[in-house]
Amino acid sequence: NAGVMQNPRHLVRRRGQEARLRCSPMKGHSHVYWYRQLPEEGLKFMVYLQKENIIDESGMPKERFSAEFPKEGPSILRIQQVVRGDSAAYFCASSPKRGYNEQFFGPGTRLTVL
Amino acid sequence: GESVGLHLPTLSVQEGDNSIINCAYSNSASDYFIWYKQESGKGPQFIIDIRSNMDKRQGQRVTVLLNKTVKHLSLQIAATQPGDSAVYFCAEKENTDKLIFGTGTRLQVFP
């Protein structure tokens, strides 16, 4: 049973470019969460999605960031016009239902903005 | 220029000893408190959780204690092994399902 998959594992972008991060949840999981982690810090919640719905986006920056989880295919975290401060590890987690305590994390995508 | 993150507090223990990792939380309304382990280059891994109406829960080699009076959470690892070396995060889970992570503690196990 494959775990949460994220790709790419490493992504390098120049300032002003777009970054697209993909997350495939565990089989049977319809709830996806995105977190951002700076070096030597804890993870910060960004957004919580269910298939085709955004449940909680209270941690998403107001501009340049968007997320989706379509009916078919992976969840996408999109960062437009990246800046150096966007450099971080972005983790996706999934769970099978609302209220489930254990979130299963993927290996993360490490974004570096030059 | 690059931002420099804070250095994580570090706990160094000898193999076979018990480890105690502490965490202070802020939100009294959290339903659950959860401990995660993160190894270098990997995503966090669930260890154990405790509901807010409990004060102790035991797992395999791990025990979590919750003191709501002082908003304190601890993780005890018995007979610490080299494979336990990692960064440990406590997290609060709100009723919206999002996790609020603490700053983390690095556990180093030496022979």
Image: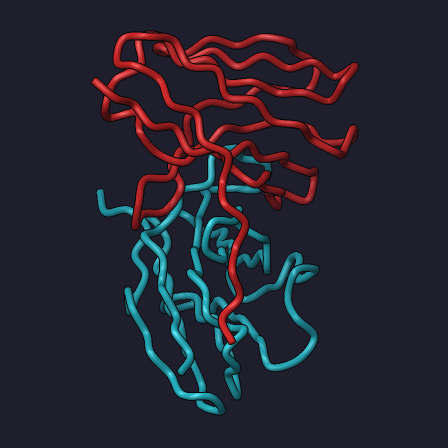
Q: Quadrant of the C terminus of chain B?
A: top left
At horizontal 41% and vertical 48% (from top left) the residue drawn is A29
At horizontal 58% and vertical 35% (from top left) the residue drawn is B91
Q: Pick the residue in front: B16 or B66.
A: B16
Number of callouts: 0
Which quadrant of the structure image shows residue A6? bottom left
At horizontal 46% and vertical 13% (from top left) the residue drawn is B76
x, y percentage for residue A46?
Answer: 59, 59
Q: Pick the residue in front: A104 or B1.
A: B1
Residue B38 shows in the view: yes
In the visual, does B70 lie left or right of A45? Answer: right
Which quadrant of the structure image shows residue A58? bottom right
Chain coloured cyan:
A
- Of all residues shown, which one is farthest toward the bottom? A16
x, y percentage for residue B73?
Answer: 62, 20
x, y percentage for residue A31?
Answer: 50, 51
As displayed, is residue A83 above or below residue B50?
Answer: below
Colouring scheme, one of rainbow, by chain, secondary structure, one colour: by chain
In the visual, does B59 lie left or right of A7? Answer: right
Chain B shade in the render:
red
Which quadrant of the structure image shows residue B11? top left
As displayed, is residue B7 above or below residue A84?
Answer: above
At horizontal 59% and vertical 36% (from top left) the residue drawn is A99
x, y percentage for residue A102?
Answer: 47, 34
In the visual, does A69 lie left or right of B101? Answer: left
Residue A27 shows in the view: no
In the visual, does B109 lie left or right of A80? Answer: left
